[in-house]
Amino acid sequence: MPKSDGGSPISGYIVERREISGKWVRVNKTPVLDLKYRATGLYEGNTYEFRVFAENIAGQSKPSPVSDPIKASRPISPPGPPINPKLKDKSRETADLVWTKPTRDGGSPILGYVVECQKSGTAKWDRINKDDLIRQCAFRVPGLIEGNEYRFRIKAANIVGEGEPRELPESVLAKDILHPPEVDLDVTCRDLLTVRVGQTIHISARVKGRPDPDITWSKDGKAVFKDNRTELTQDFPHVELQIKSATRADHGKYTIVAKNNSGQAQGAVVVNVLDRPGPCQNLKLSYVTKDSCVVSWENPQDNGGSEITNYIVEYREPNQRGWYVISSDLTKRLIKASLIENHEYFFRVCAENKVGPGPVVETKTPILAINPIDKPGEPENLHIAEVGKSFVYLKWRRPDYDGGSPNLTYHVERKLKDSDEWERVHKGSIKETNYLIEKCHENQFYQFRVQTKNEGGESNWVKTAEVLVKEELVKPVLDLKLIGTLVVKAGDTIRIEAGVRGKPQPEVTWSKDKVETDITKSPRLKVENGTDYSKFCLEKSKRSDSGKYTVTATNTAGSFTAHASVNVLDVPGAVRNMKISDISSDRCTLSWDPPEDDGGCEIQNYILEKCESKRMVWSTYSSSVILNHALVTRLIEGNEYIFRVRAENKMGTGPPTETKPIVAKTRYNRPGPPDPPEVTKVSKEEMTVVWNPPEYDGGKSVTGYILEKKEKRSLRWVAATKTAISERRLKVTNLIPGHEYQFRVKAENEIGLGDPSGPSRPVLAKDPIEPPGPPTNFKVADSTKTSITLGWGKPVYDGGAPIIGYIVEMRPKLERKDPEEGWKRCNAAAQLIHTQFTVTSLSDKEEYEFRVSAQNQVGVGRPAELKEAVTPKEILGNFKLLKINKICSSRKLLSQFSNDLLVRGRPAPKVTWRRMGIDNVVRKGQVDILDTMAFLVIPNSTRDDSGKYSLALVNAAGEKAIFVNVRVLDTPGPVADFTATDVTKMSCQLSWVPPENDGGSPVTHYILEKREVDRKTWAPVVADWKKTSFKVANLVPGTEYYFRVTAVNEYGSGVPKDIPKEQLMPPKILLPENISIKAGQKLRVEAHVYGKPIPVSKWLKGSDDVVPSGRLTVHKSPNSTYTFRISALNRAGASKPSKPTEYVTARTPVGMYDTENKIT
């Protein structure tokens, strides 16, 4: 403080700062009252100087002397303890420790860590890393003695020094961890590893086990050792095998075995080394002729690790050096090579896979291209073609292999069934492949054989089965030389040939389409029949000749039928069902059906032509229409057009089909007239008119309707609506009663308004009147020995006229054929206008049936009958609460509510109204009892009148009560527990509880307001807040505020709730200004701190925080605050308590000093 205040109290201080040799800058915007100030916004590493001005009412003082330069930097202290130190691994001599760096580095980077060890049984901690700090958050402690137990702790160090240690939670016993081995091959080499020749085989695995297991590698059961190409690496858990410059011999199954004292494990991988395949095996040449030979070979012993993709075959002549490729993509292991006669050839072959071609293998000696002559093959398909009375006709086929000589001849022999000798049946050799063997004995069994002969020799014999020589009867067989359907063009000749077999010779006939007609008389048809064939020729075919032709062969052994389908291709027929749609001013759409006859082949396209009627010149619009519809554009509006379409197939164009003339105009039109409307629900001033949409909407959707009306005698129609209506129903009002009206309707679309419908039938404007419906809720209301009281309700439908009375009828219960027989009117003297009637002079020994009917000016309506017959009887000790009416409304709309109940009982019960929890509500309401009605009326009702009410009935027969829940609709009551928390110099947190009484309607939102202490008006904070808490920001520091909150429902704003005044009390400290004690005595300083909310206390010594230690302790005790309220007491009891006072803190007043205090 300055030595002199200038005669006026100092109002504050102003602080300025500058960087070295810089410009002075003001630090605080408003003067501060304290003798210290925390300067913010400094830049770390910069050096600053400060000075202070004092200020009173007269102005500012001169600046204070400049402070010493000070550098802006963080305060540095030793770091905190490391986090979560734990044992990662151990052995009998080492322990692996890991930890996490401290959360607090003391303001300086962590330089390293110190690990200390304590042996079991001693209290001394020995430093492990004596020379250097540990840089990482992990360390292996060496030099442990097996079997001893150790404890470890770790400290972090920065530039200031070592921080607080953190000890491992458990001790460590130095011993090996035994774990059986585990082998996990790398995912890249599991199951199968494929490499190319020359690449490196790389097999890696992760091996776990304690102690470290011994690793053994093997290939196909043989151990693998380190050599010039093989490297074995063991860096647990990583184990690796590498074989450089892989060769084909390195492929096989590699196994890794890990073994220690706890067990063993192994893993295996198959290594495939890809190389070119080896040489082919067993190269052979066969079937050598003058122009070809067959080269064959076998697969290589080694395919190089991949499948053989193809073979390359080459040849050369002895006097040539170059090789010529026969085939380079051969997949089979043989090939037929073309040769030149009398030339010599060498051949060679190599296999190829995806790596490349392998080594070649070639023939050692050349071959000469000449034909070898060998024995021919056996005759093929030897069979007996025909058997006669004394002959047998044999047929066979030339052998597939002629032995190298085309000069083949045949030998034919025969023998009887029981004979062992074969007899040649011809002289010389037979060159044909058939032979007729004659001079056979009838009814004898013969066997025949045939062999082939050339210059190389004779083939083996081919024998037939034994056959009986006799005259045969063979059923006819036809063999049509036709596959599928015979297709011919129109005008061409239809030729069908059939092979004929049968004995005796069959007779052949031809017919068409399953009708046996002799078509041989046609001048266009020629039929040629032979011994073994029949030919059908129909010249100049036509489309009508298409169909199924039948050929029939008949002899004495039977008949045989065959069929042949013939399709004669011609131009298609005319298209069908041509239609024109979607006609507009410049286009239209044509559609048609395909022709019935497509000409025997698929319709390829259609040709569309058009012509103007006035010109009659046809022009092709499109000659490539694929579909059976087309859109025709570029028409001229108003012109008349004719269209024609022809179908086209591959044979040509069919006849055209023409349309009727059409005029190109817009396809949309005004809608047509609807049907005449109908009138329903007629009254004297209004009628309801309904109608249906028109059948024709003009091509556009109907957008609305215009309804017109007129009186029957009038000629002028008047619109009933000013604008078009979309619905097809309208209630016409303001009619003149007694007048007849007619209606008509017009439909409207985008094009315009259509023609009107026909007029409706005339309808007279009057109310419809008819007899009323039956009364409702017909029942027995009361009963004595001689009378029965009946009650009912008004009919649901009064027939269009007021009810003028009721008719009550009765009859004794008897069995009757006619349900209307025996009814007697009870109220015969006068008209009954009430809904209750008592029938007297009844006998309690009979059952009676009752019914009641309503009557209006038209007549009597249908009656309502009791469900069952009743007997008069006395009702004692029974009372009923028949009707409850509850009216609950907002006091803003209706200022009272009432409960009225219909009460009956004998004798008349005593009626008492009560409110649950309160004995008597008559003090505010009014209780009325009128005849059988009990009323409770509470005027000027408020939300506080909501609750549960009871009506108790008591008479000699007993008691009965009924409860009524009343809800008065009003604005909400005040909220509860309105408090302020987390108060800072510029904000606070407000919270509250919804009102206990929401006024009968849910709270929709809250209105929050504030005002300063020295103001009377409230300012809104938020006007539509849904939650029950809100953080108020942007408050002015040092200013006291009042807050209030109001709940709002659909009926308006409720009662506001103010926050208690003491809720926002700035912090205050009650503390002695000076305390003097002698050295060595106990210093005790008590400070009473209060404020709303409870402030956070902090002790300082000078500008440093007070740190608790063994000599210094800080105790915090909660303040005790109280509030009071008063109740009056007399003989009747205690009254309601008064409103509570403000909260008061119990304390002993001492000297006050309203500022932050320092202990000196």
Image (spheres, rainbow, N blue to C red):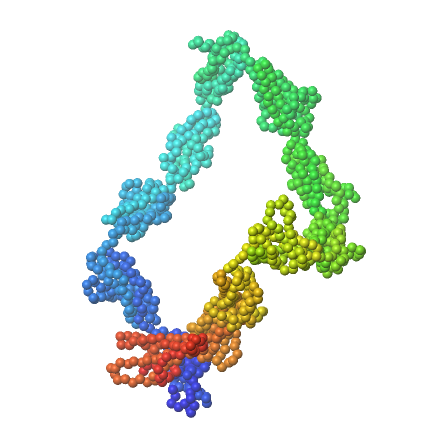
Residue shown at 28% from the left, 69% from the top: 164
Q: Quadrant of residue 1037?
A: bottom left
Residue shown at 57% from the left, 19% from the top: 477
Q: Is residue 934 left or right of residue 47?
A: right
Q: Is residue 57 left or right of residue 715?
A: left
Q: Is residue 215 above or below residue 147?
A: above
Q: Is residue 1093 left or right of residue 718?
A: left
Residue placed most toward the observer, 460 or 1020 = 1020
Q: Quadrant of residue 737?
A: bottom right
Q: Is residue 588 above or below residue 405?
A: below
Which quadrant of the figure contains the N terminus?
bottom left
Q: Is residue 342 above or below residue 741?
A: above
Residue placed most toward the observer, 122 or 779 = 779
Q: Residue 480's x, y, as percent?
A: 59, 23
Q: Residue 1154's x, y, as percent?
A: 39, 82
Q: Residue 1113's x, y, as percent?
A: 29, 76
Residue shown at 66% from the left, 34% from the top: 598
Residue shown at 49% from the left, 64% from the top: 954
Which quadrant of the figure contains the C terminus?
bottom left
Residue most extreme to the left:
121
Residue most extreme to the bottom:
7
